[in-house]
Amino acid sequence: MKKQTFLKGALTVSVGGALAKVLGAFYRIPLANALGGEGLGLYQMTYPLYCLLLTLAATGVPAGLARAVARAEAAGDGARSQALLRRALGLFTAVGLAASALMFLLAPVMAAVQGAPAAASAYRALAPSVALVAALSCFRGWFQGRGNFLPTALSEVLEQAVKIAFGLFFARLFAGDMPRAVAYTLFAVTLSEGAAVLFMLFCAAGQLRGRAAFFARPALSRGGRGAFAGRGGALARGLSRGGEPLYAAAGPSAAGLLRSVLPAAAAAGILPLSNIVDSILIVRLVGRYAADATALYGLYAGGAAALTNLPVSLCYGLAAAGVPALAALCARGRAAEAEKRALFAVKCTLFIALPAAAFLFCYPSQLALFLFRSLAGAERAVLARLVRASALSSVFLALTQTLSGCLTGMGKAKTAAGAMTLAVSVKLILECVLLRVPQISVLGAAYAAAACFLVALSADFVYSIRERANRVRAGGYFLRFSLAAAACAAAAWPLRGAHVLVIFAVSAAVYLLLALAFGAFTAEELRLFQRRKGHDHPRRIGL
């Protein structure tokens, strides 16, 4: 298999994630037409619990498994890599099934706590997808650990395509019955995950050498050292931090897999847990003085989040590609180069996220009118205010996502989890204060989220970029791209009355011209991360 470079892998996942996110964003338009603000609120209420269970069962799997597989591949041990996938599928699919059953049983309880009994059927319709995503995450982590990011990107696009096709069909079929329409549109998510799992099975079958090689245990050589002898033996004995082996002689143990995955899952699971609290706090606290609290929550979690998370999705590939890349470098004792690569990932994230945030901040009304035309004028005005309030937090979240992936690749996933725990604590405290003020209302959730991601970003940055010179460079990148982002947004300001796509085209053109003018990326930087297969020296590439 031909491995992809860091940049190619990041671009592959980012393009796939961006396309999937764009499809998802445009899906919100007809979905909002069919469900309205109230229906969109019910739709979004199910996601915090879903995301939490998904995180515990699956979200940490790609990062943790990719790190372990990358180290096995670096040792040239394909048998161990296959054994990792086999054991991960058995373990985490079982965990996913248990999580699906838990979500199904908790459906009426969560609906009652959130003050929306109609959401119970929506929880049940979405529950099976937890187990499917758990299996899907194992395949994604295995492919990413081997340096192949294309299956992940294609599966994300397939997910969105299936969800959109069936979701719109069900929404229109049950247009007269809102709770039923919401439940079936969420069942479309389950169908989409099933389609993605089948696709990944097909891709994996093409990579593995027949069913016998996949399901057989790694062969043992004389002396019982087996597939881990030779240059892979030392790595197998000291694969995890602290010298604890992740693998026994016959293959990876369940405990070893859990040790490699749980820290990443904990780091990723804290935020969904806080979102469950959000779904309760926002509706309950805002509901004390507003009759449309559920609709306001839907506008915040389903409308504004869909727009502000777009730059985060564009940067997702940098986090996904960073895990196996940094894990392989750290395994070879090249910590300085690993930090240099993390700094480059930060630079790429700033290059993407800052202009997107500037556009969201300057033109939220135009975006809301274009994407959510069916909303009433008052709801659209609230959505625009939420988008503007959340614009800067999209930069903080994108950087946090990238640096959290870098920390996981460096073997510091627990540090990322601790940073997010502290950040979420700040967020919940601020929400309890701000949401009680009628003049602030649901905007308090957006302000609290910005503070949350700023705290997490600060902690992740301190522990991932240790060299003072690299920190200074990161500050320079932030200043340079901030000025360019402000200039591109300002250049389109005279056209603010035009169609939003025209405004976007002008802003993008100005930003790219400025990036070329001040040399956003040097040829040396691009050559640094373009490697020949099996070699450590750079080769020249065309741009």
Image (cartoon, rainbow, N blue to C red):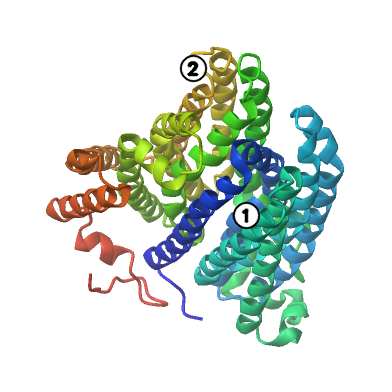
- Residue at 78 percent across and 34 percent down: it is 111
Badges 1 and 2: C-beta atoms under 8 Å apart? no
- The circle on residue 440 is 2
Say whether disc 1 or disc 2 marks the residue closer to the N-terminus: 1
- Residue at 50 percent across and 31 percent down: it is 379
Residue furthest toward the right? 105
**Residue 17: x %, y % from top left:** 48, 59
**Residue 415: x %, y % from top left:** 55, 38
Q: Nearer the viewer, residue 83 or 497?
A: 497
Asked if one can make out residue 228 in the rendered structure from this viewpoint, the answer is no
Look at the numbered disc 1 and give the secondary structure of its residue: loop
**Residue 314: x %, y % from top left:** 42, 53
Task: Measure the C-alpha gap from mark 1 to mark 2.
Answer: 48 Å
To which residue does mark 1 refer?
A: 240
Circle 1 packing at 10 Å, graded few (<14), some (14-19), many (20+), is some
Asked if one can make out residue 355 in the rendered structure from this viewpoint, the answer is yes
Q: Nearer the viewer, residue 209 or 470?
A: 209
